[in-house]
Structures are given as structure tokens and as C-alpha cells.
Amino acid sequence: MKAAWSALALAWPLFALDPLQSYTFTPDASEEVAFEATESPVVLGGRSTTECSNNGFTENVSDIAIAITDKGQGCYASDQYSVGDFPVVLGRVTIQSSSINVAAVEIRAAESPAVQFVASGSRLYWRLPGDGAEYSIYRLRNGVLIRLATMQALDTAQFVSTSVNLEAITSPEIYVLLPSSQIIPSPSKMVLSGQQVTECDHVFPESETIGDITLVTMSGSNSNCWTDDRYSNSNYLVEKGLLGTMVAFRISPPTTIATQFVASRTNLYIRNPANDVKVWTYGHGQFELLDTVSKSDMDFAKTTVRLDNLEEELIVLIRPGTEQLTVWPQVSSTVEAAVLDGGDQWSLNCHRFQLDGQPFVPKLHWNHGPGTHSGNYGTYKRFFAVLRTDGREGVVWQDFTNDVVKVTWLAADLLSSETHQLTALNSQVLVGAAGDGANEMVLILGASEKPASKSGTVEAEAVKFSVTGSELLRKALPTEKATMNVYSFSQSGATVAWDRGAGTIACAIARTMTIAGDGLNHQGGIAIVLNASTLELITNYGQTSGHSFANSLQVSSKEGWYLGMDLGDNYPRGVNLWELKGDSRSWRKKLVYTFKTKHGTSPTSPAGAAYPEYTAISTAQQTYYQWSNDNYLYTELAHPGLHEVDDTVLVFFAGEKPPLDNSLVGKAMNVARNVAWVKISRDLQNSSVLSPGEEEIGGFYTFGGSFSEQTNRGISFLTSYTDLSQSVSRLKTAAINGQIVLLWEIWSSSSYNRTEFMVIDTKGQIQGSWPLTSLSFPFELPFADDVVVKNGRVVTYVGTDGSKGSSPSLARFELCLGSTCEQITGTTGTTDSGGGSDGGQSTSAAGNSGVSSTAPNDVSASGSMSLMLSAATLLAFRAFGI
């Protein structure tokens, strides 16, 4: 199988891919409106007139007057219960674009506060001309005129209420009166309080609206809308502008933070849409769907977009419900592709094939970092690369929406795909899969539920399919205690390899066993070999390692043999390399790397035995004792991580250094992990080590208190990270033309940071054209998946999230190395959608699918065609990966 992948060469058409489309928010042009004082301040008492008695306006400044107003307790004009003495400054404002130069007034905070409390308000009145016209009053704030209210002039000039209350102002406010028919520029930016509109009253004043959006205080505890600065955040700068050619709003985080706690959240509301719309955001180079809003009869419709917890600017777009926003260039109706990153000697590319179903996405389905408890135990492989006689590559995967197992075949030109359903709806786990490189695939399926009894065994089966999805053979696996002894399949997963020449299929499987004498169901790895024709068990090799939490397996270059390794916490403790013969119970093992152990922190073990202090590693802060029961591995296997070169084997992993320091323990990860390797003789009985690295001797006390010696020789570290926030994880390896491509992710204990790669020769020397390089495009790999080499390229797969507005897809990433690196596929050429099904359920993703996938902003979504290259050029040195 490995040879079939490596040797295959197809004369594929080559095209240059476009980069991902990039967008920049451009705020609308803004004309700052300024107030210019024309008079000195005049104090307006504001208590001589009350609305209750309607006693006329005996005190005014020009056309401005203030009246005491009833707030529900009457009109109290005394200084005990109302404020007064407002400094008033007359002036003008000018709007150049509208040729407006009009009188304005600045009113400052009252200089005479209420002695007791404010029982009555102070309302602004404006004398209107006797022309019967309608007028609007605006507030000028932050250079923007905001309409507050409209008033109707009478037949004679009179003071008319503006509905503007002044008793609570704390800083100068500027007001302008204009005929309602006067058109003024719409504001391009405003500070929306978020407290002036609430979910409780559903009143949407224009002063709290910009374009088609407003910010609303939501109902909180006790169904109250808390607009108090103690219990809600407020004051959001909102800018209107364009993202490409699309109207967008940029919302900044609140500048006023609740002094106590947030009792009421702030949500985005949008003006009542005439039809269903989608609310999108654009950030970090991607579009993300935030909400879908249906047509509503209300003035504004609620969205689920929360704003009070913003930590960075949020760009919001309101688009038709039928529109799909994406930064990915569309190279066919169902395939997106782009070059994502690169330099003179390399490029990172990706093709995304639309699917019916949701494949595995690391961030959604297993996102545990190297420093987490779950991260120590690993997870299943998720995508299994298979190959057909016609050279088309396929991927076996399990749908996370319904557990159905499917195979997706990619067209030779990568412009389409077709997917066949392999299993019916069930609760089985896809333990592993492999293909023969020609016409058949085999799946190892196991029940996901554990038996009710600890002595029971789980049902499992091997099922063979044709490449088009027809079931050819189904065979139950002997999971009973006397053979495979599988109480349940372990999350540490499995690897399956098919040796077509030998007619065998090998499986390395992590499983939990039936109840032991101590009443526990212990975990361990097992290796078995099946007859590829009949799926009958040929050989059960039994346990590979006790507590086996990762594994790798491949067809060996040594005819009839398989080469594998697993990572165990005991029996043995370390990276356990082994080979086994497919048709007989012949195998050899070799421990190539071992690691530290956390010892007991109390003298008595769980078994009740007492042990002396382990003084060599005890400190003033922590005393250790001479027993251990440490399940942590402090190591991750690379995948596949095994490479046979001439008569040697190169083994790769990520480990903590120094590896045998038993004092650097206590957590799943205690120091940063780094890329490491060791090179040994292919004859596993040969004790020679061929890689550079000093000998390190150590050991640990077992659970029973005996001392187990440990030795590492020839362990060579290729990176030297020291900060726990910069740790190697998810290491992938590929051998191409006598060199090794190493690809890994950098994590903190629990969070992804970035992806890096380098290339070394078989002596461990870093190659100058590809030193340690960080990729700018963020992507995460399935934890335990292997990469495969095709045409001198490394290919790997991952799913994309279908919940954020885009269709779920199978993503094929390529890291192309070499000066002759061209991009595969584009927007022209013959689409090979493959032949018809011979019995399996199939869905085709070729031709016109009717799916709308919009590349907005009039940016071209097509790749540009380059010259057709020969098959010889296709074999130039390249490595594809994520």
C-alpha cells in the first residue's frame, strides 16, 4: 500500500491557485460638525415656568426657555426638589456638505442642584416661527447630529416642548433646530449607549440607531432591564462603512464597564428585515455566521449577537438569507481552493470539498492539549486514506451527525468528489480502516457501548467493501477473553495496515480488557493479523504494551512483515518498537525511548503497602516515596513516525527533556515538549544506536516497590522550546527522496498556537532550504492521523465546521516544497467525477449543485490557469501537508 501511494504518478493538469480573498473595513467619510459660540454664557434659571400651571415663559435666552416638568410627583419649582441655573451659550453650527449654517445652543449642567432630591424635571422649550411647519431637534455629540424629536409649529410664534430633559445632564450638550424637511448627512459613526433602548420597553429612538442597527439592554435577573452603570456595560463606538462593496458596521468594545457586575447583557438588534437575513462577522481573515433572522413585524428584530463582552472590534454585516459569504475562491461548484501561505521554497495549499455530513473537526470534536488529562490518552484516527487502481485518492471517515461511515473519492483534477455511504445508521465506532490500493477497503467497527458486566466483551467486526461502496464480506472479530479480550475499545485508537502482496491485514488496537483478579478492567494494546481474503484471524500477537495510549503501524519494506510502535506507561514504559510477521506468530520488540515517572507522595500505596522515602528526588516542598503508579506519558508519538531507511529505522516523537528527571513531574505536561528522534538498526535485536545523543541513565520504583532501570541512548532533540506555552504536539512525519518532512503544532497546555515545519536528512541535519518555519494560516490536525505520500507529496485531511455559515467539507491540505512547486487544479480542465455506483449508496458533488457560495466584493473567485506540465515535472520534490 505504501509503495502504491509513493510510486503513483498522474499527469494532472496544474494551475496556479489564488490566495484567500482579503477584506478591509473602510469607514464612511465623516464630516465633523463643530459648534462655534457667538455669545458669552447666560444663566437661565429654569424655575420660573412650570408645565403644570402653564404660566407662560417670562424667562428665556433668545428662543430658548426651560420649564419645570412633572415626573409623576407634580411640578416643584423650589430649589428643594428641582435643579436650576443652567448656563446657556448661543452659537452656530456649519455643515459644509449640506450648505447648512444654523443657530445652535449649548446648555451646561445646572449650577443649582436640588437641596433634597429631584422630584421634578427641567425640560427644554424652543420658540418656533408661526409657519405651521414641522421641525426637528438634534443633539450634536462627538461631531455628529442625532435627531431627538420632532415638533409642530403653530400659526403664531410660540415656545414648544422639545421633549428633551435637562435635569440629569452632567456635561455640556449642544442642540440644533432644523426644518424636518432638511436633509442632513447620515452619521457614519456614533457612540451608542446600549442603555437607552431596552428589551423591556421596545422603544427604539433614532438617537440610539445608526444605519440599520441598534444596541439593546436585555432583560436580566428578575426580568429587569438593568440600565444602571453598576449592572450593565455601556457606550459603544459604532462605525458604518464598507467591507469591500458590502455595507458593514464596526462595533468597538464598551468603554464604560459595570462597576458591580453585568446583570443585563447588551445585544445587537437590526431593523426589521423585509426578508430573511443572515448576520455575519468578518475577522481574522474569515467570515463567520452569527445568526439568522426571520422577517418580523416589529421595528427592530432581536439577534443572538452579544456585545457587552466584546474584547476586540466586531465587524457586522447584514446580508440576504440566500447569500453565502466566504473568503475561499470557488474553483468549481462544489470545491473551494486557495494558496494559504508560502515563500520562495514552499507553499501551503488547500482544497475543500463540500460534503453531505459533518466530518471530524479538531476544535469541535477533540481539542485537548498536551497538558490536559484527556490529552494524555489520545484519540482515534479520524481520516483513513485509500487508493484506487485508477489512481484516485479517497478518504474513509465517520459522519459526526449520525455515526454513518462514508468514503469520499476525489476527482483526478480535484474539481469534484463523490461520496458513498458504507454503513447504516448505528452506534458503532470506526476503530480503523485501510485499503488495498486497488479495489477494496476494510473497516474495523466496534460497538460504542460497554457491556453491562465487567466480564463481558464488546461486539466488533471487520467489513470489506468495494471502492464504490458495495459490501463484499462481513466477519465478526473474536473479542472474547480467550482471544482478543476486548471489554471495550479505548479512545487511544487503532491503526490498520493492508499488505496486498502478502494477503494480510494487521491491526494495532488499544482496548480495555475484561475484569482482572483485582476487580479492574485494565487497558493495553494488542496486535492481530487477519487474512485479507476471508477476514479470518490468522494470528493474535497479544499485548504490545500495557496501558498503550498511542500506536502506529505500517507495511514494512521487509517482505511479509509489519513495523509498528506504541506508547505505554508500563510493560514497557516508553516508546515500544516492534515488528511482526503477517502469516505466523513471529515478532520482535525493542524499547527505543523511555521517560520519567511520578512517584508516590505518601508512604502507603493504594495496595496498602508502606515504602521508604525516595530521597534522591525529594525536596523541602515535596517528599516522594519508593513506589509509583503514573499513567502520564510526558510524550506524544509522531504519525506515522516510523521510517525505514536502508537497514535502519528512524523513530520520531515529541518529549520533555531531560526525559528521565523524575523531579519534573506533577502534571500531564511539566516542561515544554520538543521534536525528538532516534535511529536504530533495522534488526531490532541489534543494540546499536545510530543517531547522535548522549546516554542517559535513570529509573523508577514500580507499583510494587522494585527498582526498574532506564536508559536512553542516541535521543536527539531537533527543537529547543522551554516555555510551557510553546510546546510541540501533533507531530507528523513523511519521508521523501531521502529527506524527512516534520510538521507539528505549537500548543500551550490546552490551546493551539500555530503550526510549524522543517526538513531534515536521515542524519538529522536540518536542511537549509526548509529550516524551522512558522505558518501564518491557523489550522489544526487530527491528533493521531497519519499523513500519506503521493507523487512525492504528503497529503492529509481534516473536516471543516458546517455550523458557522459555510457548508461542511473535507479539506485536503498540501505543503509543497521546492523551487518548482506548482499548485494542483484550478477552474478549468476536465472534471472527473468517477464512474457510477455498483451497489453502495452514493452522492455526487460534481457539476452544478445549486449551492450558492458567494465571493463578495467583486473579487475574482477563480484560479488562473498556468501551463500544462509533464508527468516528469509532477515527480519533482514536493511535500503536501497541514
Image (spheres, rainbow, N blue to C red):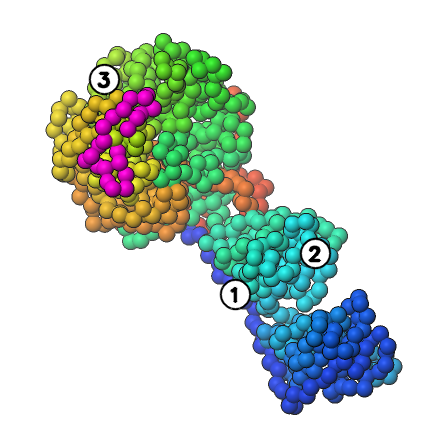
Q: Is residue 99 left or right of residue 416?
A: right
Query: For numbered disc 3, what is the local secondary structure?
Result: strand
Q: Is residue 400 left or right of residue 562?
A: right
Please identify the dominant SS of the magenta region.
loop
Q: Specify the quadrant that holds the N terminus.
A: top left
The image's mark for residue 26 is 1
Q: Which residues are magenta?
A: 603-624
Query: For numbered disc 1, what is the local secondary structure?
Result: strand
Q: Residue at x 56, y 48 (%)?
A: 289
Asked if the stretch drawn in magenta spans residue 479, the answer is no
The image's mark for residue 587 is 3
Q: Is residue 289 above or below residue 519?
A: below
Amino acid type indicated by mark 1: Thr
Amino acid type indicated by mark 2: Phe
Amino acid type indicated by mark 3: Trp
x, y percentage for residue 203?
A: 73, 60
